[in-house]
Amino acid sequence: MLELADIFRLYGPAYIKMYGDRMMPSHKRVISDIVNCRTPALGGQLYECSHCHEFEYSFHSCMNRHCPKCMKNKASQWLEKERQRLLPVPYFLVTFPLPAELRKVTRSNQKIIYGIAFEASAKAMQLLASDPKHLNGEIGLLGVLHTWKRNLDYHPHLHYLVPAGAISFDKRNWTRTKYDFFLPVKALSIIFRAKFRDALKEADMDLFKSVPPQVWRKAWVVHCQPAGMGKEVLKYMAPYIYRVAISNKNLLKLENDLVTFKFKHSKTNKWCIRTLPVFHFIYLFLQHVLPSGFKKVRHYGFLSSKQKSTLALLQYILGTVEWQPPEEPLSSTVKHLCPK
């Protein structure tokens, strides 16, 4: 079966020779790691069966988060951990795509643009939710960065799984939203664009000036849809946390310097075939390699690591768990809710 490692092994050296001076170190590292994954280059471990006493040697994995053969166990662990944090309330899936005009500058400045997109989108939702006309409280956000379409094209966007409600600022009440409405997406789009613009201008004026001016005048789009009780969306998100842009099972053939792969069309859900020159295929793949150390999953509001006490309190109030005082002390405003 054709693997991504085969493509990199055969064409990676020539690709690096041609484009190496323009490649980020993380891209070269990914090629090297995927080629060496589960090969003698990384060594291995000898296992003995306790029943038949036969020996089996297993090569080490590269553990690079962009390798299609690694990280499946971590994805399962992440999914189980997040499931335990779900509240017994409806959820919404809120999606923030970056405008097409921003893709070129984003591709060349991923760390700063992705970071700004996270902060601007989270702050936009938090600002609207805090308004007395809406939820008048604090919301919880689980955000995941996704950079690709199924056909490997570059399409950076953020998905947020959000409980349908907010806890009041004094931590006394939980306000539920309507089952089919979370926040007004038109207002959310305007605030997201403004916060993104201001943050980019403050972070790097030269980078800000490189953005086409019409980007700040056009309407940005935000999507919001009901997501049931959140379990299915978490299951959808999990593979993208520790998965690369394409799986080995979707690679069909490598022939005459052309790579052919299959993908499911997002609208028709039918399988499609795409064939690309091998260097272009490698380029498309590498543009989804994240900057070293970049966190593609982030929590905000009462789902952030700094607010474990608030999440524990909500789980108790909403009947998910029995009360277990968290490690950090609760504020005096919430102690009255704890059983004596």
Image (spheres, grey):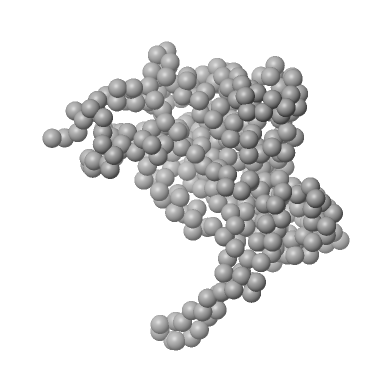
Looking at the picture, how far across and down is residue 84, in whole percent? Answer: 36, 45
Q: Nearer the viewer, residue 210 or 176?
A: 210
Extreme residue in the bottom direction: 53
- 102, above or below 133, in the image: below
Looking at the picture, how far across and down is residue 158, in whole percent? Answer: 58, 35
Q: Nearer the viewer, residue 291 or 39?
A: 291
- 95, above or below 51, in the image: above
Looking at the picture, how far across and down is residue 85, in whole percent? Answer: 37, 42
Quadrant location of the C terminus in the rendered image: top left
Extreme residue in the left direction: 340
Picture quarter containing residue 331? top left
Quadrant location of the N terminus in the rendered image: bottom right
Q: Is residue 132 visible?
A: yes
Q: Nearer the viewer, residue 151 or 7?
A: 7
Which residue is found at the position 55% from the left and 36% from the top?
159
Q: Is residue 223 visible?
A: no
- 102, above or below 59, in the image: above
Picture quarter containing residue 337? top left
Which residue is found at the position 70% from the left and 16% from the top?
217
Picture quarter containing residue 321? top left
Which residue is found at the position 40% from the left and 82% from the top?
50
Extreme residue in the right direction: 256
Which residue is found at the position 55% from the left and 51% from the top?
242
Looking at the picture, how far across and down is residue 92, in whole percent? Answer: 47, 31
Badge count: 0
